[in-house]
Image (cartoon, grey):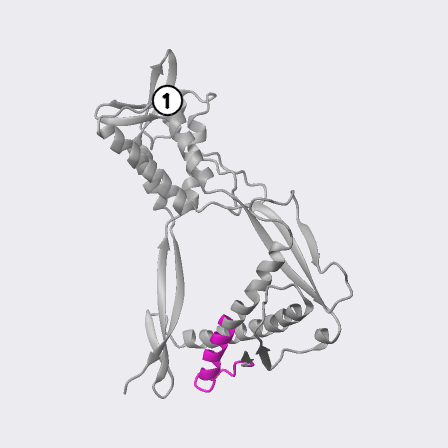
Amino acid sequence: MGVIEVVGVFSGDLAKDRIKYERAQNNVEQLIEEISPLEKALCEATGFNKFNLPPQGVHEKKIPENDDVDVQFLLDTHARTKTPSYKNVVSGMKGYLNGILFIVSQGSAITGVRKENDMYYMSVNKVKEAFDIIVGGELESTLEYNIKYIISGPLAKEKTLKRLVIEEKDRSILDQDNFSFYVRAQRILNDDSEFIDAYESKIKEKVPKEKEKKTVQVSGTRGYTAKKTKRIIPPYGNAVRILVNVPVDSHPREKGEMIPVGELNQLIDANINYEDKVEMFQHYDLIERDVRNKPVLFVSIKSIYNRLDNLLGIDPTETESYRITPKEIIK
């Protein structure tokens, strides 16, 4: 058995509310641990899982089915195709090209790969097929659950408790006792999370923009170090989308804006002649050769690799975040 003591609203005074801040962190961690089993059980009660996806659209389920209860959960479930991890896709593309180069450099032959003027070329169709498979390997159907609840009776009028007693109980059981506990815990979780955000925002305000790190003393020998972290993220998604069409394209676009056709998709287009392809895509080293009495377009592996690297260097995103850690100040 345990007790959660609610911290209330941040006063704006770091020293005065230091203990409350630390207690709020512990509360949030403990409450998430307590309510997670019920959330998992609610999702399982829909009957849907990775191997039994719902039909197209959003499916709502009431738990329990009868409405004459204090707490009733509404679960909206729908399946969607997950947007691929473009960083993994780029890594897969480079790994594939490196693997081809390694194998042929060992003297082995690979269908669709040829060597001319000390340069290795691959048929464009083979590259496109391989890259599509790499993208496809990152796509999968996943379930999304939206958990809502309707409350009635005394619980609906009840305000956030100042103290919540946590009893030893299986929180995965779908009963009204656990449902009421979930609502009360969620209220405290929301309030304490807001307290943490407000407290940490106050610490960040004390870090000068020109500094990467500063220790903020809040009381006696107690303080917190706010460290600013900057990351440069290459445009993995943009690079992949320029090379090939992506089945799931979550990239935000203006109304009426056309989704661009991947460069490799255009290179395999039989309606575009070889001369136009060479003119359109001068960053690729293209050659056309007869294979079994049919013209086949080849592209040098080096030029694909260079194109990928060049795309990764265009307009990278810079992100900035803070990490706040306790710090003992020795005088």
Answer with left or right where residue 132 lies relative to residue 51. left
The residue positioned 36% from the left and 45% from the top of the image is 312
When asked about the image quadrant of residue 175, the answer is: bottom right
Which residue is at the front of the view, 135 or 270?
135
When asked about the image quadrant of residue 163, the answer is: bottom right
On screen, 111 above or below 46? above
Answer with left or right where residue 162 lies relative to residue 260. right
Q: Quadrant of the C terminus?
A: bottom left
Magenta stretch holds residue 15: yes
Q: Quadrant of the N terminus?
A: bottom right
On screen, 165 above or below 294? below
Is the residue marked by circle 1 packed among few (<14), some (14-19), or many (20+) residues within 10 Å? many
Name the element at disc 1: strand
Residue 91 rendering spot, x and y as whole percentages: 35, 43
Q: Which residue is mark 1?
A: 297
The answer to whether residue 187 is seen in the rendering is: yes
Find the magenta span and give its range.
Answer: 8-29
